[in-house]
Image (tube, grey):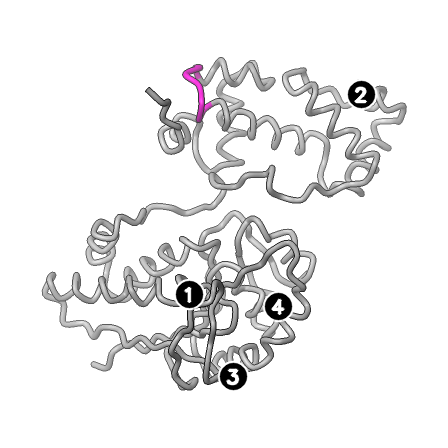
């Protein structure tokens, strides 16, 4: 049997670690499969580019081969800083976008890592498809590509032969899924243990830090948000909130929704969960006590809301993210 051909598309400004992360894990999986007595063909990996020379983010020069037919093409992410001119960056990557489009048209399975999804979208591969990307840039992606059904809570999304992943380490979630499909669950589990990689993740929700996400809204909604922030533990009462801002409940929902893109209650729940996450990480308070601190008298109801936002129950979240105290 012929090995599965996996190509990684390197380009100016890409993250070098995302170029080599998946091939390295596949190399480990090949050794693990052989140790398990597998006769399945392994992987043939290559780093390809339509350019002769590629300098990655941070300055390292990457040796590349010419673009050629592969079974799977992986597109890494790039340094998407707040000051980056995204339009200019994507325009300068025209040769890469054309290569992605050509490979997909020939039947190649295409995979993006992190904000590599922007390149797939520019190539026209994501229109009408479900996709994911880094939670930090999900809003920016959604505004730019309105025809993509974005699932920002997901780590890996595959829709009709096109796969997108969340930020950075999600390349390993994809790689393990890939190994699981190619070599079986036993090889994938062993590879994950050897590499110290979590093979049971399914969502990026627990890692989202809403403080880093740009705040949406106008003067009215920002005022409402400040009031809700200052009254975090108070019982939510839409009528009282509307009276506080001298509007009807209908006007409150309409104006807040138009500016912020959500309801006041949805915003309040997000802020309460953010506060609860901090308390779970840094204190010894019981879950019931934390629930009361953020406005929930019923710990069960709090647990359900917390799980919807983070993908984990409060106790599981604490076990995963609890910060050790000095001394």
Which span is picked out in magenta? Answer: 280-286
Residue 108 or 226: which is nearer the viewer? 226
Q: Position of residue 32 (x, y in %)?
A: 17, 61
Q: Foreground: 321 or 238?
A: 321
Q: Are marks 3 and 1 in contact (CB under 8 Å)?
A: no
Residue 16 badge: 1
Q: CA distance from mark 2 to mark 4?
A: 41 Å
Q: Is residue 246 left or right of residue 327?
A: right
Say whether disc 1 or disc 4 marks the residue closer to the N-terminus. Answer: 1
Q: Position of residue 300 (x, y in %)?
A: 49, 21
Residue at mark 4: 127
Is 182 above or below relative to 105? above
Q: Is residue 26 left or right of residue 78?
A: left
Point out the tag, 2 or 4, that comes first from the N-terminus.
4
Q: Is residue 84 left or right of residue 16?
A: right
Of badges 3 and 1, the one in the foreground is 1
Front tag of 2 and 1: 1
Judging by the rendered image, the residue that carries numbered circle 3 is 102
């Amino acid at each position: 049997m012929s090995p599965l051909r996996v190509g990684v598309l390197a380009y100016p400004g890409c993250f070098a670690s995302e170029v080599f992360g998946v091939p390295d894990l596949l190399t480990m999986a090949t050794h693990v499969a052989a140790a398990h007595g597998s006769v399945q063909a392994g992987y043939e990996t290559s780093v390809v580019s339509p350019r002769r020379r590629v300098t990655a983010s941070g300055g390292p020069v990457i040796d590349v081969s010419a673009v050629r037919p592969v079974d799977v093409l992986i597109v890494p992410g790039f340094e998407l800083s707040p000051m980056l001119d995204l339009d200019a960056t994507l325009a300068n990557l025209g040769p890469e976008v054309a290569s992605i489009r050509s490979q997909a048209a020939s039947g190649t399975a295409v995979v993006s890592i992190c904000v590599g999804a922007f390149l797939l979208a520019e190539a026209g591969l994501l229109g009408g498809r479900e996709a994911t990307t880094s939670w930090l840039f999900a809003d920016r992606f959604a505004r730019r590509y309105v025809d993509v059904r974005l699932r920002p809570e997901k780590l890996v999304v595959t829709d009709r032969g096109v796969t997108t992943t969340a930020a950075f380490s999600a390349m390993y979630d994809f790689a393990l899924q890939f190994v699981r499909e190619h070599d079986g669950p036993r090889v994938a589990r062993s590879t994950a243990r050897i590499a110290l990689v979590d093979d049971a993740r399914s969502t990026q929700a627990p890692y989202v830090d809403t403080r880093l996400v740009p705040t949406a809204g106008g003067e009215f909604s920002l005022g409402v948000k400040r009031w809700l922030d200052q009254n975090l533990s108070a019982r939510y009462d839409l009528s009282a909130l509307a009276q506080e801002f001298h509007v009807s409940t209908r006007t409150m929902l309409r104006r807040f929704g138009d500016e912020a893109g959500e309801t006041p209650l949805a915003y309040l729940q997000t802020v309460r969960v953010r506060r609860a996450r901090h308390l779970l990480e840094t204190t010894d308070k019981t879950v019931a006590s934390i629930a009361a601190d953020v406005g929930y008298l019923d710990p069960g109801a709090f647990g359900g809301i917390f799980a919807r936002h983070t993908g984990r129950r409060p106790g599981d979240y604490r076990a995963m993210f609890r910060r050790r105290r000095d001394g």
